[in-house]
Amino acid sequence: MGKYISIRGWFECEEHDVSKVKEICREFTENYSDTELNYNTRKLYQSGWVFPENQVNWTTYIFYGADIREYHLDFIKEQISKIAVIPEITGYFLIDDHEGEKKICWQVFDGHFVETEQINILFNN
């Protein structure tokens, strides 16, 4: 039995990018190759994505929030890495476990996915 990891964060993008992100998420739900992660679990984890129905002013925000098994973390990480290459999309995600042993941050900018330690984030201490 594995422990759980909390993932929460968002992407900032243009309204026309939402369909691109949805397509990547759909592809991961349908075709992710890890045989340890069955279709029903993939679908469950994908329900953590929240897509806006309408853009408010000029920036569209896509949110993700879920507690998943630590050994399935790559499922979300690989999605975010693939989404990161969409031009001009940015993102910020906090990842930690309930014991405080894992505290990382995924950042998306300029077509890059960067993983760092959470540093100087006061509300998450």
Image (spheres, helix red, strand yellow):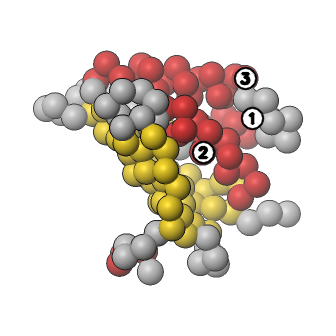
Disc 2 and disc 3: Cα gap in Å?
Answer: 15 Å
Q: CB atoms at circles 2 and 3 under 8 Å apart?
A: no
Q: Position of residue 86 (x, y in %)?
A: 42, 27
Tell which circle, 1 or 3, labels the residue nearer the N-terminal end. Answer: 3
Q: Residue at the spot x=52%, y=20% of the render?
A: 23
Q: Position of residue 117 (x, y in %)?
A: 51, 67
Query: Residue 90 got which mark?
Result: none
Query: Residue 31 got which mark?
Result: 3
- Residue position marked by numbered label 2 in the rendering: 77
Name the kind of residue labelled 3 in the image.
Asn
In the rendered image of this protein, does residue 3 appear above or below residue 16? Answer: below
Residue 107 is left or right of residue 59, and the answer is: right
Q: Residue at the spot x=54%, y=32% of the render?
A: 82
Q: Secondary structure at mark 1?
A: helix
Name the kind of residue labelled 1 in the image.
Asn
- Residue position marked by numbered label 1 in the rendering: 40
In the rendered image of this protein, does residue 113 appear above or below residue 58? Answer: below
Q: Can residue 119 be seen at all in this image of the molecule?
A: yes
Name the kind of residue labelled 2 in the image.
Lys
Q: Position of residue 15 (x, y in %)?
A: 28, 24
